[in-house]
């Protein structure tokens, strides 16, 4: 069946030419106005379109409504941007286009881009990776490029951002797809067992080794091995994995025969491996071997435009899974606009996993057969509107670990400290400038200088919020002896945010 494309008529000349080009290329096309929403546009024709081309009016409300509706239904969009637009890429990001072309647009280019979008859409259907945001589209392009080769891949991203899903997609799209995909969580296996788990052992290799056992590398022969939480791998095992990567051979524990395997290695970590190298916790030679191809999965809060789509998909999925055969009257109806808005604004420290788990519980528990604002736990509701409110037990219920709870708590404390500082600044008498309000001065020189006096962050007259923030970062770095991961934790901010600020304040 031909793929269905809708072309808006805002720029009639472009619309007519592109419509003709698409038709000639075999697409099932139709022209609609920007005022048509997706449902209206396909009324009487059954299936939703695969792609919508917006020929103009991108700054206008009707086009933006159409875009939002398309995103929610996982329909790709291609926008034709005026040549007078100062930054087409930024506009595309702002309004949530999947792709864009700058006018005047050759109909052939529009056809090629449309075809690419449709291929990617099929890829998403195959892999289950949802999202129309530019960030996710970039990830999909990388997956497409990385799947056919055998180079190692390193996937980085916060917990619950889809690292395992991406690893599986790379394998499933690769020529190895019929062969095993073996996942090993390096953090979940005790150090003493990891080696025999990965490489296997011979009978009698150690107490309890009653039989020969094949390791995961051998089981993955011909396919892919996914080393999850690779940053937590103990140094002794790192050496052995490095060897496998270098000559594809290893020994079983207690074995004397070298074993050769053909395995593609895909790894993931939710901490920066580069930092682990800098801290001496991860071998740099292994890091370079693993980091041949790199994918970063952005946190959900940095691609909020995908939230409505994810919410609708998860509701549909769980409404089917948990449908009550005995109560056909209790069909799950969906989510109210207000509730969706709250979910779209929340912070989601546990990313997609947290969102998915919450939707499941709400679908099961929502008393009205519909998710309403009152069904959303207070910590989520308040997170979108300023600072997190920590409801005891809530974080665990949402599948968020203690670490996240600790970070959130630190964030609240930091905010309270800053507010206290601000209050003091405001209360400070105007005269007598230069009087020190608080405690010890933080040396602005070397942030890593372990000799500098330790103590509370200070405020001095004339300091701006930026100065205070800089001082807080310096103090945190000093306290953690330059360990940036710990410093970020202490400050209750993300590691990436800390990096950005280090750069901003020229502390890096
Ligand atoms: N883009 C996406 N579209 C749909 N579902 C997704 C997407 N990304 C992640 N998920 C779902 O979210 C959940 C968490 O994903 P996954 O296990 O891949 O995350 P992770 O990054 O490996 O997390 P962790 O670091 O905690 O191991 C899974 O149920 C997965 O199917
Ligand atoms: Mg994982």
Image (cartoon, rainbow, N blue to C red):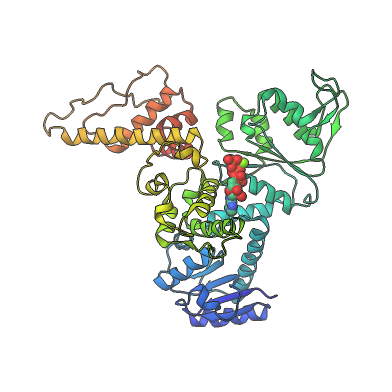
Q: Quadrant of residue 159?
A: top right
Task: Residue 291: give x, y in percent of width and height.
Answer: 65, 39
Lateral position of residue 410 relative to residue 32, left or right: left
Task: Residue 399: give x, y in percent of width and height.
Answer: 52, 40
Tell me if residue 223 comes above or below residue 279 in the rendering: below
- Kindly give the residue lying farthest to the right in the view shown: 257
Tell me if residue 324 comes above or below residue 186 in the rendering: below
> Which part of the image, by quadrant, shows the C terminus?
top left
> Which part of the image, by quadrant, shows the N terminus?
bottom right
Task: Residue 436: give x, y in percent of width and height.
Answer: 21, 25
Tell me if residue 202 can be seen: yes
Judging depth in this view, the residue of 206 and 461 nearest the camera is 206
Lateral position of residue 415 relative to residue 290, left or right: left
Q: Quadrant of residue 192?
A: top right
Give the residue at x 49% y 82%.
12
Judging depth in this view, the residue of 402 and 181 nearest the camera is 402
- Kindly give the residue lying farthest to the front in the view shown: 326
Judging depth in this view, the residue of 499 and 182 nearest the camera is 182
Tell me if residue 391 comes above or below residue 127 in the rendering: above
Task: Residue 379: give x, y in percent of width and height.
Answer: 40, 44
Give the residue at x 67% y 46%.
167
Lateral position of residue 363 relative to residue 169, left or right: left
Tell me if residue 83 can be seen: no
Judging depth in this view, the residue of 314 and 321 nearest the camera is 321
- Kindly give the residue lying farthest to the left in the view shown: 431
């Amino acid at each position: 069946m031909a793929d269905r494309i809708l072309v808006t008529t805002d720029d009639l000349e472009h619309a007519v030419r592109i419509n003709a080009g698409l038709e000639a290329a075999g697409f099932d096309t139709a022209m609609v106005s920007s005022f048509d929403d997706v449902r209206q546009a396909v009324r009487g024709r059954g299936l939703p379109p695969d792609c919508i081309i917006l020929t103009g009016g991108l700054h206008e409300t009707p086009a933006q409504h159409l875009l939002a509706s398309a995103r929610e239904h996982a329909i790709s969009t291609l926008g034709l941007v005026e040549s007078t637009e100062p930054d087409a890429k930024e506009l595309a990001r702002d309004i949530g286009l999947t792709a864009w072309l700058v006018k005047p647009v050759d109909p052939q280019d529009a056809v090629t881009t449309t075809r690419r979008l449709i291929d990617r859409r099929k890829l998403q259907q195959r892999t289950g990776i949802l999202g129309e945001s530019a960030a996710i589209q970039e990830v999909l392009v990388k997956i497409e490029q990385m799947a056919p080769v055998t180079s190692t891949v390193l996937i980085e991203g916060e917990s619950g951002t889809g690292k395992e899903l991406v690893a599986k997609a790379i394998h499933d799209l690769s020529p190895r797809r019929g062969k095993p995909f073996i996942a090993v969580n390096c953090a979940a296996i005790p150090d003493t067992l990891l080696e025999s788990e990965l490489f296997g052992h011979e009978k009698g290799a150690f107490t309890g080794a009653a039989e020969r056992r094949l390791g995961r590398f051998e089981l993955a022969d011909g396919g892919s091995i996914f080393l999850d939480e690779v940053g937590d791998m103990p140094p002794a095992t790192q050496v052995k994995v490095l060897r496998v990567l270098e000559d594809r051979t290893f020994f079983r524990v207690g074995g004397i025969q070298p074993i050769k395997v053909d395995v593609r290695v895909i790894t993931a970590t939710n901490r920066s491996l580069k930092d682990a190298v800098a801290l001496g916790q991860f071998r740099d030679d292994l890091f370079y071997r693993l980091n041949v191809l790199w994918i970063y999965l952005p946190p959900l809060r940095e691609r909020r435009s995908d939230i409505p789509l994810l919410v609708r998909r998860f509701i549909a999925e769980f409404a089917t899974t948990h449908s009550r055969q005995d109560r056909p009257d209790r069909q799950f109806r969906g989510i109210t606009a207000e509730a969706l808005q709250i979910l779209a604004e929340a912070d989601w420290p546990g990313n997609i996993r947290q969102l998915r788990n919450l939707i499941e519980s709400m679908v099961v528990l929502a008393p009205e057969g519909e998710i309403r604002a009152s069904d959303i736990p207070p910590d989520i509701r308040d997170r979108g509107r300023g600072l997190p409110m920590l409801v005891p037990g809530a974080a665990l219920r949402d599948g968020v670990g203690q670490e996240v709870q600790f970070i959130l708590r630190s964030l609240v404390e930091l905010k309270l400290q800053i507010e206290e500082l601000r209050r003091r600044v405001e209360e400070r008498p105007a005269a007598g400038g230069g009087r020190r309000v608080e405690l010890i001065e933080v040396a602005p020189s070397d942030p890593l200088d372990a000799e500098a006096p330790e103590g509370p962050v200070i405020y001095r007259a004339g300091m701006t919020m930026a100065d205070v923030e800089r001082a807080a970062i310096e103090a945190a770095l000093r306290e953690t002896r330059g360990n940036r991961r710990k410093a970020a934790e202490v400050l209750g901010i993300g590691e990436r945010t800390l990096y950005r600020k280090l750069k901003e304040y020229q502390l890096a």
